[in-house]
Image (spheres, rainbow, N blue to C red):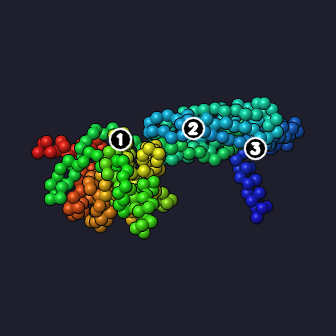
Amino acid sequence: MTTDSSGGRLRQAASSVVLTRRGVGFLVAGVVSFVAAPILSLPALLYVTGLMLALVLFSGIYVFAGHSRVRIERSFAPQVVPPGEMSHATVRITNLSVLPCLEARWSDDLPHGISGDASGILPALGGSHGTDSRVSFSYALQGLRRGRHPIGPLRVNVLDPFGLVFRRHTFGSPEMLTVLPRRYELRPIAPRGTSEDGATRPAPQHVGVGDDDVIARAYLPGDAMKRLHWKATAHRGELMVRQEEQQLTPRAAVVLDCEPVSQGTARDSQGQWEYSASFEWSVVAAASITAHLVKAGYVVVLQSNGTAIDRFIADGQDTLEDAMVDLAVAEPEEHDNDRRVAPERAVFVVLGRVSIERAEHWAATMSTSRTVLALVEAHSSREALGVLEDARWRVVTYRPNDDIGHLWTEFDGARTHVAG
C-alpha cells in the first residue's frame, strides 16, 4: 500500500508539470530537426534536436524540484466580518527546502460569497538556511454572503527561466473566514399581547428578571443554571430556581425555525442544502430582532428548532457576536428539540411556510409563553395560521422580498391601540 501511495503521489506531481506554448514549440522544432537531419543530410540538426529536448527536460526537472517544501500560514483581520465589509488576509510563506524557490505567480482559491483580488507575483525565496527564505503579502477580501467560507489553498504556478515549462503547486489547507448575516435597524415598539378574554392589549414593557429573593419556583427549560436554589432543590427533590420578585431587566426569546420542509429546501445530489430565499430571509429577521432587543437592554435567549443554536445573551454569558456567528453558519435542522421556552419571556418566532401539523407543534411548544409574536411565510395555509391565532399568537405574514423593518412595526401594539 505504501508503494502504491508513493507512486500515486509521484504520478500526481508529474501531471502537475505543464508545457507552455514556447515549450511545445521547442518540442515541435526538435522533432522537425530530427526528421529533417537525414533527409537534408545535415547531421548538425541532430545536435539542435538534442539541445532543444535537453532544454525542455532540464526545465521540467528545474520546476519539479522548486517549491517542493513550503509552509503556508494564513490569517485574517478581522476573522469575522459583517456583510459588505472588508477583511485583510495575510499569507506568510516559508521555504523549508535547502534549494531556493523560483519567482512564481500565486492565487488563493475564493469561494462564492467572497470577493477579492487574491493573486499576484511571489518573489524568489532563498534556501531554508538563508535570511530571505520567508515572505508575506496581504490582500483585501469582502464578504458578500453569510457563512463560514474556506479561503485557500494557495496555488502557485512556477515557471522555469526559459519559459518552457511551469508546474502547478497547491500548498496549505483552507482557512475559514466568517461572514455575519445582514441585519437591519428596527424601531422601538410596544409589542401587543393578549388578555385572558382574547382581547389584544400592549404587552408589558419589562418581561424579565430582577433582584433575587428567597422565594423558589420549579425550574423551567431556559432558566440560567446560576439561579438554581440548591436548598429548595434538596428539600423538594426537584430542581428549583430563585424566583424573581422584581422584574427590572426585560427578557425575551427569539426562536428560528430551521426545519427544511418549512423553509422550502432539501439536499442536492452532493448532499448540500439548496438555496432557500425564505430561509435566508428568516435568518436575517432573527439576526435583526436579536440585535434590536440586545441594544434595547433585553436579556435575550436565541434558539433554533433543533440544537444548533442555543444562546443566552446577557452580561457574563454569551455575547451578541456569539449569536450572530451561530446565525451566520445556520443550516436547516431536520429534528426538533423538545425544550420549552420559559413562560415569563416574550417570544419572537420566525417561521417558514407552516403546515397544520407544524403550527400545532409550535403552538404546543409555546403554550406556556405569555406573549408570542410570529413572522410566518405568507404561503402558509389559512388553517395553519388559524391554529396559531387560536393559540393567541400575534401573527404577521411575510414574503422573502419584504422589508423587515416595515413588517416589524406591525407588532406595535401601542400604535394599533391608538389607531383603534
User: Where residue 286 sits: x, y (%)?
Assistant: 36, 48
Report which residue position mark 1 lands on: 297
Q: CA distance from mark 1 to mark 2?
A: 31 Å
Is residue 103 toward the left or the right of residue 188 in the image? right
Residue under the image location 20 percent in, 54 percent down: 194
Classify residue 377 by image quadrant: bottom left
User: Where residue 314 sits: x, y (%)?
Assistant: 42, 46
Q: Nearer the viewer, residue 147 or 307?
A: 307
Asked if disc 1 and disc 2 are in contact, CB closer than 8 Å, the reply is no
From the image, state whether disc 3 or disc 2 is nearer to you.
2
Is residue 93 toward the left or the right of residue 128 in the image? left
Identify the mark nearer the N-term, 3 or 2. 3
Q: Which mark is residue 76?
A: 2
Label 2, residues with CA under 10 Å away: few <14, some 14-19, many ≥20: many
Classify residue 186 by image quadrant: top left
User: Where residue 302 sits: x, y (%)?
Assistant: 39, 51
Report which residue position mark 3 lands on: 69
User: Where residue 283 sits: x, y (%)?
Assistant: 38, 49
Identify the mark nearer the N-term, 1 or 2. 2
Q: In this rendering, does residue 40 appear at all?
A: no
From the image, state whether disc 1 or disc 2 is nearer to you.
1
Can you say whether 223 is above or below 51 in the image? below
Can you say whether 303 is above or below 87 in the image? below
Residue under the image location 32 percent in, 63 percent down: 365
Amino acid carrying label 1: it is Gly
Q: In this rendering, does residue 15 appear at all?
A: yes
- Count of all numbered marks drawn on residues in the image: 3
| Element type at mark 3 | loop
Amino acid carrying label 2: it is Phe
